[in-house]
Image (spheres, grey):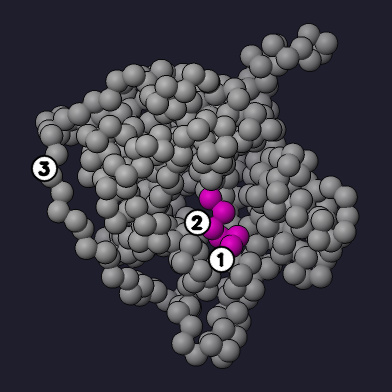
Amino acid sequence: MLVYSLPPVQDRLAWRVAEWRAQIKYALFPPAEAIFTPDPTLAAMVQSTLAAITPTATATPPSSTPAPPTITPTPTATLLPLPPSAYLSGVQHEYEKWNNCGPATLAMTLSFWGWEGDQIPIAAFVKPNPRDKNVMPYELQSFVEQATGLRMIVRTGGDLELIKRLIAAGFPVMVEKGYDFPGADKGWMGHYQLVVGYDDAQERFTAYDSYTGGPNLPVPYDQLESNWRAFNFTYLIPYPPEQEEVLLSVLGEQADEQASIQSAALRASEEIYTLAGRDQFFAWFNRGSSLVQLQDYAGAAAAYDEAFRLQAALEPETRPWRMLWYQTGPYWAYQYSGRYYDVISLATSTLSAMSEPVLEESYYWRGMARNALGDVTGAVEDWRAAVNTHPGFEPALAQLQAAGVAP
């Protein structure tokens, strides 16, 4: 134990200890079998109340199939033909440390622009608790803009053509995607990957991966699109300030964040009618996430209800039960449509399915729901757990300050 407490030893062995712990727990209590089910009675009550208060509400009862939202895409500007292939050299590959794909992938991306750091300072900034399972895109963006002299754009609703145009214009692209990791204790997880090249003749991208494949990993077009769907086609682009005008020109309508959200919402609403199985689940989830960004919380809640219904019907081996590790849209939707008990149930099921419950967002939102129901003591307990899990987590600190209690 004394030897293990030494930082260099912990750095090499902590992830193995965590994996053994996960294997034991997941063997006894398979997490893919623990499924969140929204309360249909509560959902119906909230929907009827919203309809009575706001007759023109866009919410759709979760028992029916919601119609696609009315969205008018911005016309696409005339673009020059793309070269049949392109490749960006100059990236320094880096394998990730434990739970570190976000910091490692960002470090690789920044190396293209001459940044000389590695994943260690990034991880210290975005996840002060090394056991944290996930890093959100906005956390990576904060590091870039506060610590590197570069800027970063984060958008949803990307597509393969846009990735090609960005690469051809000299911008490597980080994508947030799903991936089926081998091993009984792994399965589907979220992952970041850096795309640096494409080749139309072979119909594949070239990527740098911090976990599998290393540098110059070939990724078929259809494989990237399928895996990317799990995160609503989210992409991240660090860039020097002097390159901003060029980047915005390449992005076209995606340069406007609101337009990119509307584009993502439209795509998800079309895909729920054309896809099946797990991809259809992702499409419904994406619809909910886009509607949250558009502040249609009742409509988003209805979309998430359908997504969770589809998730429960999937085979356990393919079920993406870790979705709430990476995306918090359902919390927003249920909280701001008055479905506090669903927020509590979802957060509790998410935390209980982990080998080690270290998701500050789940604690935070459960605290918000408990507070809304008058359970101030429970709320404070959850907000403190969020801060203990992620020291300095500002949303929870703000709630504790408003409640007049110490972290």
Check disc 1 and report the residue beneath it.
Answer: 333
Q: Viewer-proximal residue, 330 or 341?
A: 330
Query: Residue 329 lies in magenta, yes or no?
Result: yes
Left/right of residue 334 with respect to residue 174 in the rendered view: right
User: Is residue 185 visible to us here?
Assistant: no
Question: What's under tag 3, amino acid-wise?
Answer: Pro
What segment carries the magenta color?
327-333
Lower sequence index among marks 3 and 1:
3
Lower sequence index among marks 2 and 1:
2
Which callout, 3 or 1, points to the residue nearer the camera? 3
Indicate whether 175 appears above or below 51. above
Quarter occupied by residue 80:
top left
Residue visible at 73% across and 14% down? Answer: 7
Left/right of residue 304 with respect to residue 349 in the rendered view: left
Q: Viewer-proximal residue, 79 or 181?
A: 79
Q: Viewer-proximal residue, 146 or 179?
A: 146
Dominant secondary-structure state across the stretch colored magenta: helix
Q: Residue 241's spot in the image, x, y percent? A: 41, 38
Under circle 1, the secondary element is: helix
Q: Viewer-proximal residue, 279 or 257?
A: 257
**Pointers 2 and 1 in contact (C-beta within 8 Å):** no
User: Is residue 208 visible to us here?
Assistant: yes
Left/right of residue 279 with respect to residue 77 in the rendered view: right
Check disc 3 and report the residue beneath it.
Answer: 81
Indicate whether 86 appears above or below 385. above
User: Residue 238: which disc?
Assistant: none
Residue visible at 47% across and 30% down? Answer: 106
Check disc 2 and report the residue beneath it.
Answer: 312
Label 3, label 1: how far apart the Cα atoms are: 41 Å
Lower sequence index among marks 2 and 3:
3
Under circle 2, the secondary element is: helix
